[in-house]
Image: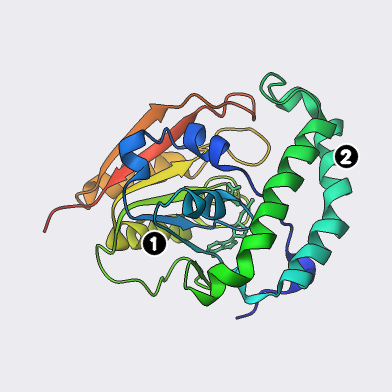
């Protein structure tokens, strides 16, 4: 796989943030969940600890704990400084400062690092990049994809987004994507294309408010239901 360690910028969120970002109900937590582009989030580790079922996939899982840890150390300060320089783009409520943001993210990423070797061995972390996944049709009840699609609208084409969402819908009965803004907090130019094209192919799409807003205006998810054959 062509991913270079120098291009990896690890940044992961916690279970509490996932619950709000994806509006996960207690019943949702009981479902078979795929966390696509899970990266160094602690969602899988924390869910597994509570007895729930999550598989995370991400190309970054091809690297070792020490390689990912090294990238966290190299990129952590520049990311926090980047947020500080653009602090008006964020809502400082639940998270009150760039330094607190850094602490929360580091805690989540350390939780991930502690779980990664065991989770890799047991198949909870899978090296699998969109737009083609190795999972079986309908293997999951729910697929989550956080901070990849729409976030990187400047790097990932509309065709990539369409193929990626179709693939997530192949492996899961329901897909939730958060956020639907790009990385600068602007409306994604790809969202209207997705909203136009996928219903033409029989998918059901819905934009829903969520009880999470860190990127200013980033308080909505896109829910997609698999077309019925
Ligand atoms: C900003 S992180 C988000 C981590 C986590 N979902 C969260 O919200 O905290 C974005 C992740 O997308 C992953 N990624 C990049 N290209 C991908 C692809 N083609 N398929 C799946 N994941 C990819 C990166 O490796 C990175 O871990």
Q: Position of residue 24 (x, y in %)?
A: 40, 36
- Quick check: 174 above or below 67? above
The structure residue drawn at horizontal position 73% and vertical position 63%, both measured from the top left corner, is 8
Do the residues bearing badges 2 and 1 touch, measured as CB atoms within 8 Å? Answer: no
Q: Position of residue 51 (x, y in %)?
A: 42, 52
Q: Residue 32 or 204: which is nearer the viewer?
A: 32
The answer to whether residue 64 is left or right of residue 45 is right
Disc tally is: 2
- Quick check: 60 above or below 43? below
Q: Secondary structure at mark 1?
A: helix
Q: Secondary structure at mark 2?
A: helix
Residue at the extreme left of the image, as rendered: 229
Viewport quadrant of the N terminus: bottom right
Q: Which residue is mark 2?
A: 81
Ligand 1 contact, mark 1 (Cβ < 8 Å):
no
Q: Which residue is mark 1?
A: 163
Q: Is residue 113 visible?
A: yes
Q: Position of residue 173 (x, y in %)?
A: 25, 53
Q: Give the Cα distance between marks 2 and 1.
A: 34 Å
Q: Position of residue 165 (x, y in %)?
A: 38, 55
Q: Residue 186 or 218: which is nearer the viewer?
A: 218
N-term-proximal mark, 2 vs 1 = 2
Residue 97 sits in quarter: top right
The structure residue drawn at horizontal position 66% and vertical position 74%, both measured from the top left corner, is 3
């Amino acid at each position: 796989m062509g991913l270079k360690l120098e291009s990896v910028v690890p940044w992961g969120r916690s279970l509490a943030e996932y619950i709000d970002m994806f509006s996960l109900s207690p019943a949702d937590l009981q479902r078979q969940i795929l966390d696509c582009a899970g990266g160094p989030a602690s969602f899988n580790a924390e869910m597994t600890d509570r007895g729930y079922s999550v598989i995370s996939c991400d190309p970054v899982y091809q690297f070792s704990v020490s390689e990912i840890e090294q990238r966290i150390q190299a990129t952590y300060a520049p990311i926090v400084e980047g947020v500080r320089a653009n602090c008006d783009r964020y809502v400082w409520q639940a998270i009150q400062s760039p330094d607190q943001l850094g602490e929360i993210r580091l805690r989540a990423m350390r939780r991930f690092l502690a779980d990664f070797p065991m989770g890799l061995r047991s198949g909870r972390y899978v090296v699998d990049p969109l737009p083609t996944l190795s999972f079986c049709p309908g293997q999951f009840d729910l697929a989550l994809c956080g901070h990849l699609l729409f976030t990187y609208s400047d790097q990932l084409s509309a065709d990539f987004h369409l193929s990626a969402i179709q693939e997530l819908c192949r492996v899961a009965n329901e897909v939730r994507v958060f956020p639907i803004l790009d990385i600068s907090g602007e409306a994604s130019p790809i969202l209207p294309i997705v909203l136009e094209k996928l219903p033409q192919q029989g998918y059901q799409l819905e934009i829903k408010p969520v009880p999470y807003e860190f990127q200013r205006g980033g308080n909505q998810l896109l829910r997609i239901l698999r077309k019925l054959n």
